[in-house]
Amino acid sequence: MATVVFIHGTGVREPGFSKLAGRVAAGLTALRGGLRIVPYYWGGTHGATLAAGGVSLPAEPGGTSRALTGPDGEEETAAAWAALYADPYAELALAAAGTPQVTERAPGSLPPDQAVRARLAALAAQGDAPAAELGPGLARAAADLAAHPLLAPAAAALAHDDLAALAARSLTARVIAEALDSDAPLVPVGDSRDAVADRLAEALGAPPRGTERGVRSLVLRVAGSAASRAVVRRRRALTEAAHPAAGDILRYLSRGEAARAGLRDLVRGLEPPVTLVGHSLGGIIALDTLVSAPLPQVRLLVTAGSQGPFLYESGSLPSLEHPAPLPPHVPDWLNLYDRRDLLSYLGAGLFPGRVTDVPVDSRQPFPAAHSAYWTNPEVYRHIVERLP
């Protein structure tokens, strides 16, 4: 009787593991009868825990578990800037959407966007110096904003002072976003960011800081509150929700031998042919175990959404350091990946002739794509087709 050992990924604990293992067993046996499915639940024994109950976590400001929701709340301000880093023109689009019905301008009157376009052009001519503490990119950002098609309808919807403040935030966010995209080692703190935004607003015609400017950040009012409620939670809650996954990886990379030994002992008690099926970190555990010592019972390795190839290439795989080849005793390796799963990697280019990379498509975005393998019939079909 062929045996499949299923090895779960990061963050899985009971009762979720039993449900997951049951789904995998049902998916495989529906396509091939007579299979023996053996789950390896390493998370209960070798998974990460906050052993001291989370005393390493800093307390919330003021010792409370509140999420700031007022217009001046720092959490909402951070959420608003996060939205602008993702799309520096977000406020521009929101303002343009509120443009009043077009009316004929008086003869000789200037378009409402002409003044700010002229100031943006003048700012671009100064180079990056007016925002030097943020890094390079201001001149290009100002030139692009001056030519942006949404500037005219936004100017029609806002007072000049408010438009100047909005444009300044757009420029500031664009420069910081480009720094983030380039993995710049230094990103300015909020005080520096805000000081630059105020300085640019004045250069674009807004009154000095301290003078009432009317409309505050549109993103803060429209998107920031929702983002704050959805994303900004107590640090303890976030850590406790995320730590099994992140902690499992860190614990395995530093003290993974116990998990490998447990899998080795389990496999040695099984009759061949055995297939190891590992998801995410489970695939790394399976690969490391097979590389470390021969397990002749195992005739096939299957990984899904696995980081094993990446760890090997980056010099982080415990059992094998690049460019050492895959040992001959490692069996055939089927590596399933989803292009939208940012935690899945390819192995065929690293181990030519030893790994078969097969794409699957859950039609889910990341991170859902990383957890959708075991509800995808395509995954089971590929596995069963390769079973010994």
Image (cartoon, rainbow, N blue to C red):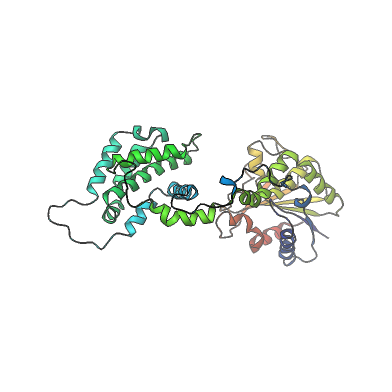
Residues 25 and 68: in front is 68
Quarter of the image for the C terminus: give it.
bottom right
Q: Position of residue 343 (x, y in %)?
A: 61, 49
Q: Position of residue 205 (x, y in %)?
A: 27, 43
Q: Position of residue 126 (x, y in %)?
A: 30, 33
- Number of numbered discs: 0
Q: Is residue 193 left or right of residue 296?
A: left
Q: Is residue 311 above or below residue 12?
A: above
Q: Quadrant of residue 204?
A: top left
Q: Quadrant of residue 30?
A: bottom right
Q: Is residue 225 left or right of residue 112?
A: right
The residue shown at (47%, 55%) is: 225
Quarter of the image for the N terminus: give it.
bottom right
Q: Is residue 22 above or below residue 193?
A: below
Q: Is residue 42 above or below residue 193?
A: below
Residues 295 and 103: in front is 103
Residues 328 and 206: in front is 206
The residue shown at (34%, 59%) is: 97
